[in-house]
Image (cartoon, grey):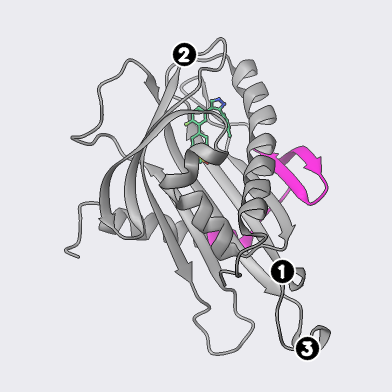
Amino acid sequence: SPKHKYYKEINEVIAEHIKYAAKLDIDNTWELIHDEGEMKVFKREMEEDGMVVDPLKAVHTVKGITGHEVCHYFWNPDVRMEWEGTLESAQVLDWFSEDTCVCYQIHKKVWPTTQREALFWTQIRHVPNEDEDEDGPDYWIVCNYSIPDHDKCPASKNVRINMNVAMVCETSMEPPSSHDGEITRDHITCRITYAANVNPGGWAPASVLRAVYKREYPKFLKRFTQYVMDQTKDKPIMF
Ligand SMILES: Cc1cccc(-c2n[nH]cc2-c2ccc(F)c(-c3ccc(S(=O)(=O)CCO)cc3)c2)n1
């Protein structure tokens, strides 16, 4: 398809997320805010013009699903209302290509802040390992990245957030020696890295925002990954 307005930006933003996911540099500048089983959620405390813009990073390991499946359900706008608990509405405004569209979504109000909405492009991409040797990294990635406006975006009084979110997944399979060739869900594990850089826009008390993030991100990751397990358990594996 002819290169659309966001073609260059999308490639740059995705490349950046892949570079960071590959490094996975959880050093001591990240503060652990939630540690439950395989799920660890970290934040950095950062403010821009008095606004809390804490980068958030979560790592989670889930057995029985693949990175392709996690990214498919995270990306697919048709099912977002089924797993995203804080959504009031979600719609697709535009398709740039079969793996890239523009979404507009309104989230439930979080007392005492004003209602928030998001307008963003979302792309799903498979990044196979480029070098010949077998064990290079193979990623599936979804990136949700805010855009300033869109001619089909409804007017609203909600505060618009600015976000750069990525879900990067790597799937590992037990060696063939452990099963007679046929791979089942018992032999697969997905390692998820979720990175969210969100400027919530409008004013909100730092303490309230940090409490919301601390509560909502782990809840969202648990609910979403459980949703993927439920949706895929009786279906053929999407490698
Ligand atoms: C998971 C989470 C963290 C922090 C706050 C909340 C929350 N609680 N009540 C309202 C919201 C809310 C307000 C505005 C938003 F844009 C998003 C928002 C959250 C996640 C994503 S996403 O890109 O990770 C998944 C697509 O919805 C996008 C927007 C969430 N939910």
Q: Which mark is residue 185?
A: 1
Please say whether residue 130 is one of the residues in the magenta stretch. Answer: no
- Specify which label sits upstream in the sequence, 2 or 3: 2
Q: Which residues are magenta?
A: 19-44
Q: Earlier in the sequence, mark 1 or mark 2?
A: 2
User: Amino acid under label 1?
Assistant: Arg
Q: Position of residue 163 (x, y in %)?
A: 44, 38
Q: Is residue 30 visible?
A: no
- Answer few, some or many: residues within 10 Å of disc 1's Cα (few below 14, many 20 plus, some between 14 and 19): some
Q: Which residue is mark 3?
A: 180
> Left of 210 or right of it: where is 88?
left
Do tag 2 and tag 3 residues touch (Cβ < 8 Å)? no
SS under mark 2: loop
Rendering coords of residue 116 (x, y %): 44, 22
Q: Label 2 belongs to which residue?
A: 114
Estimate the x, y position of residue 7 in percent, counting from the top left: 27, 58
Marks 1 and 3 sit apart, C-alpha to C-alpha, by 14 Å
- Residue 49 % position (x, y): 46, 22
Q: Quadrant of residue 125?
A: bottom left
Which residue type does callout 3 highlight?
Asp
Q: CA distance from mark 1 to mark 2?
A: 43 Å
Labels 1 & 2 near each other (Cβ < 8 A): no
**Number of marks drawn:** 3
